[in-house]
């Protein structure tokens, strides 16, 4: 695999006028880095070089880099405090930050120096980077978006604290055994995490359960207070997040749950040893494991506890900070812009109200004003099954005071609804924070919408659908609250770190590296799209990247791929709505064509899949099995394996994604229109010069608008057509019976060809397609296969293919997360940069 080699980044190290001994500790020269590395190896890892393990060397390198971040971080914190800058508090149950070493070196501007320093010390730099295990503290797009935003917030010099949970076990590691996904516990902390700093003094109590009491305070006023029956502590663990080429370092503060000490002692003293241990375990369980589902499904008590736990710690921390600066909470909303990353942190609304009213004695109206002016809500999905709700009885048992507050919010809100819609009780029922149909449940999206001053979707199409479908009533009531901010991704990680060859070529071609922070300047590449020499080098780079990927995949799967073939990649969570099965049906159609006619005119292709299925999602796991089963047959069939290969990359992660994006020719973005809120993988592929085959869904729509319809392979129904077809009564059976190719492919799966004669193995999938097909795979099949034929033809003309790829990169600037964050700053948070020079 390629890891960053000398990038063309030209950030200048800071002038350093400090005494020499200080410079050595955190200096940026080759000598200072070497000295610091040796010191860290000896004094922190406690190792002589001769006996140091790979991990010792990695840790010493990481500490060397971290020291340099810390210095800048303290300076940033001091400056923000002095200027009392407005601060973004990005609340997210997931942060999928990926490996840190290479990125931090890039941002510090020391990649080349560090490599040179390492060479002289006989260190294998790429091996060090490869050794790092990433914190998998997220499921997919939502968690990764939070991480891209943290990168851009620091780069744009916006004071920010990211607040989340320090899961001891992140997303499971995926192994493929006999074609099936097997989950393995993720023990990312076992070798130590050099990037985090525990803050045992930053600790807050978080209550659960118990009762609510009425009492008279010292001023004779009646008040309510919550008396929980369980209290756990949240301890802060901080990870510095450095901006690219700036002195700003922001904070990612993740909470770990612990039992308060007093708790164990109490029980211990009365002889209840097991009780004490049990309480400790119960407390620690809260931050133990990330839920590996990509939709919430049935209410899980622990998940609700996790959400409340991190939200409460984060708000108490913000309150502590604000009281430290201003001495009062009256201006809390001017200090903090809280962004709720989906509904998972939406309890912040009730908890902030409780803290302000019950703990700081604020009247309801003032507390509500502060809460609503502080909070902003991003929605990431329209799938009805993914909209979070909690059973009221569970909620009441865990958070009785919060339920009271939510009832109070709901009452005032529904009064407003009644007046605005003039006694329209249907609206009242639909908009209420409580769903009264079939078991009372709390609707978290409604709570988030009512308690926030801005609500946004993550791509144009998604934001429009949000306004016309799931949040239509809210949009009718408060149209001014609704915004669209199309997602973006960081070019630092997904271009510069992941694809150093392309990075060098771009910088050389357009003559500067400013594009790394101003991605729109890539437009300059347009002038060279027709340049035959550039097209050729472009192709060589792609081939080299494909060779690296092929070698790595060869080691992992035992199966090699021909770098001259078309690399057709679909990498994302495995889900029916993302339609990996549509891709498989196409592969089988090619296989059939080749079997029926060995001379069929088919462009050699390597199909690569990557992605995890939620452990309890039976059909998604069966799709993984089917991909591997089809691969097993095709890859071993000498009649076709010169033409087709099917590979499944195990354990798709941020790190593995960085291997895939640079090596893809074709990016599969084939969800059913209207289902994928945005997608961000689509942007990462396109940035690396892959062409997209896709539907008009999520951000695909805007990517196509930007790169040009001629440079994008479009197929399939529009979201509107999908709705119409569904309304008219969609019958997949008619398609199965009416299209010989569809029938023959499904029958082939059913025949047992891919399952050693077992005709039942894949029946749940085939039956689902024939009788239900909820994501209309069969309806889009014909258009997809035809479009793939166009792709086949296009790939045979390297000059024009590379021209299209160059134009994709040249026009991808909009999809930098820097652009997205600038829009949040201007339209949602009203926040300005607080620059700290490097
Ligand atoms: C994703 N959501 C969207 N949810 O599916 C994707 O279109 C979008 O680009 C991305 O957010 C960023 O906006 C997503 O990843 C989750 O993983 C949740 C995890 C927790 C349970 C609910 C889903």
Image (tube, helix red, strand yellow):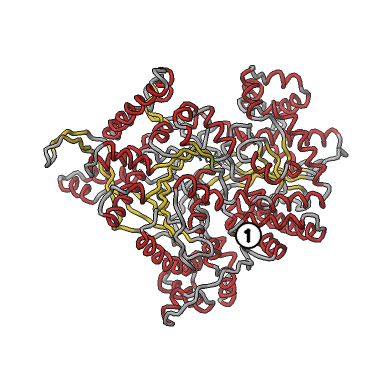
The residue positioned 33% from the left and 58% from the top of the image is: 199
* Depth order, front residue of 480/588: 480
* Depth order, front residue of 527/185: 527
Looking at the image, residue 455 sits to the left or right of residue 269; the answer is right
| Residue 474 spot, x, y in % from top left | 45, 29
Residue 817 in view, yes or no: yes
| Residue 769 spot, x, y in % from top left | 65, 25
The residue positioned 73% from the left and 37% from the top of the image is: 587
809 above or below 471?
A: below
* Depth order, front residue of 47/225: 225
Q: How many marks?
A: 1
| Residue 641 spot, x, y in % from top left | 78, 44
The residue positioned 44% from the left and 82% from the top of the image is: 20
Q: Secondary structure at mark 1?
A: helix
- The quadrant in which the N terminus is found is bottom right
Q: Farthest right residue?
A: 599
364 above or below 654?
A: above
- Residue 434, by quadrant, is top left
Looking at the image, residue 430 sits to the left or right of residue 715; the answer is left
- Residue 781, by quadrant, is top right
Residue 285 in view, yes or no: no
| Residue 377 spot, x, y in % from top left | 44, 40
Q: Which residue is mark 1?
A: 515
266 above or below 400?
A: below
């Amino acid at each position: 695999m390629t890891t960053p080699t000398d990038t063309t980044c030209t950030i200048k190290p800071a002038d350093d006028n400090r005494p020499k001994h200080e410079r050595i500790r955190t200096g940026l020269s080759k000598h200072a880095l070497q000295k610091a590395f040796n010191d860290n190896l000896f004094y922190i890892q406690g190792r002589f070089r001769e006996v140091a393990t790979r991990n010792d060397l990695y840790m010493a390198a990481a500490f060397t880099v971290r020291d340099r971040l810390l210095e800048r971080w303290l300076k940033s914190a001091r400056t923000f405090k002095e200027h009392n800058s407005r601060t973004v508090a990005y609340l997210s149950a997931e942060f999928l930050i990926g490996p840190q070493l290479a990125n931090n070196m890039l941002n510090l501007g020391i990649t080349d120096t560090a490599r040179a320093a390492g060479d002289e010390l006989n260190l294998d730099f790429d091996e060090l980077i490869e050794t790092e295990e990433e914190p998998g503290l997220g499921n997919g797009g939502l968690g990764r978006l939070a991480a891209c935003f943290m990168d851009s917030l620091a780069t744009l010099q916006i004071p920010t604290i990211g607040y989340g949970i320090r899961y001891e076990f992140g997303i499971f590691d995926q192994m493929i055994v006999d074609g099936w996904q097997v989950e393995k516990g993720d023990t990312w902390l076992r070798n130590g995490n050099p990037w985090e700093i525990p803050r045992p003094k930053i600790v807050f109590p978080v209550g659960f359960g118990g009762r609510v009491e009425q009492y008279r305070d010292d001023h004779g006023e009646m008040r309510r207070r919550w008396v929980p029956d369980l209290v756990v502590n949240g301890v802060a663990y901080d990870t510095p997040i450095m901006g690219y080429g700036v002195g700003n370092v922001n904070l990612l503060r993740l909470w770990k749950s612990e039992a308060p000490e007093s708790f164990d002692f109490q029980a211990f003293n009365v002889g209840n040893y097991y009780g004490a241990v049990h309480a400790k375990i119960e407390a620690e369980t809260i931050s133990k494991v990330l839920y590996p589902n990509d939709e919430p499904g049935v209410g899980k008590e622990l998940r609700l506890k996790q959400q409340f736990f991190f939200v409460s710690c984060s708000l108490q921390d913000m309150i502590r900070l604000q009281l430290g600066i201003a001495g009062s909470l009256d201006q809390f909303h001017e200090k903090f812009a809280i962004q709720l990353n989906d509904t998972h942190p939406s309890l912040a609304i009730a908890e902030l109200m409780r803290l302000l009213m019950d703990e700081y004695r604020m009247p309801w109206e003032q507390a509500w004003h502060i809460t609503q002016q502080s909070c902003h809500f991003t929605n990431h999905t329209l799938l009805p099954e993914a909209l979070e709700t909690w059973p009221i009885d569970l909620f009441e048992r865990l958070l009785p005071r919060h339920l009271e507050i939510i009832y109070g919010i709901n009452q005032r809100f529904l009064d407003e609804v009644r007046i605005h819609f003039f006694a329209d009780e249907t609206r009242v029922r639909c908009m209420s924070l409580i769903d009264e149909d079939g078991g009372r449940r709390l609707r978290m999206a409604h709570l988030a919408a009512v308690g926030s001053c801005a609500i946004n979707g993550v791509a144009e199409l998604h934001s429009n659908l949000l306004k016309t479908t799931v949040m239509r009533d809210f949009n009718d009531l408060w149209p001014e609250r609704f915004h669209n901010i199309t997602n973006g991704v960081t070019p630092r990680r997904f271009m510069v770190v992941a694809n150093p060859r392309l990075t060098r070529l771009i910088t050389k071609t357009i003559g500067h590296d400013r594009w790394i922070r101003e991605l729109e300047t890539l437009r300059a590449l347009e002038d060279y799209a027709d340049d035959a020499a550039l097209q050729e080098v472009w192709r060589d780079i792609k081939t080299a990247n494909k060779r690296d990927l092929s070698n790595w995949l060869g080691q992992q799967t035992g199966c090699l791929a021909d770098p001259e073939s078309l690399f057709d990649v679909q990498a994302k969570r495995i889900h029916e709505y993302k339609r990996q099965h549509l891709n498989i049906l196409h592969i089988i159609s090619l296989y059939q064509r080749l079997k029926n006619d060995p001379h069929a005119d088919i462009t050699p292709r390597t199909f690569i899949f990557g992605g995890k299925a939620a452990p309890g999602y039976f059909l998604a796991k069966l799709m993984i099995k089917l991909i591997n089963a089809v691969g097993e047959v095709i890859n071993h069939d000498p009649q076709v394996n010169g033409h087709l290969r099917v590979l499944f990359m195990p354990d798709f992660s941020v790190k593995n994604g960085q291997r895939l994006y640079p090596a893809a020719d074709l990016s599969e973005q084939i969800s059913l229109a209207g289902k994928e809120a945005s997608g961000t993988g689509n942007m990462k592929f396109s940035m690396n010069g892959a062409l997209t085959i896709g539907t008009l869904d999520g951000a695909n729509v805007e990517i196509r608008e930007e790169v040009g319809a001629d440079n994008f392979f479009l197929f399939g129904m529009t979201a509107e057509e999908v709705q119409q077809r569904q309304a008219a009564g969609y019958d997949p059976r008619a398609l199965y019976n009416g299209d010989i190719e569809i029938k023959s492919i499904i029958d082939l799966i059913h025949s047992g060809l891919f399952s050693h004669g077992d005709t039942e193995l894949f029946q749940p999938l085939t039956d689902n397609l024939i009788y239900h097909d909820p994501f209309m795979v069969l309806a889009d099949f014909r258009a997809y296969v035809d479009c793939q034929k166009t792709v086949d033809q296009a790939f045979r003309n390297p000059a024009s293919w590379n021209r299209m790829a160059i134009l994709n990169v040249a026009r991808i600037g909009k999809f930098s997360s820097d652009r997205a964050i600038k829009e949040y700053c201007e339209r949602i948070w009203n926040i300005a940069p607080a620059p700290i020079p490097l």
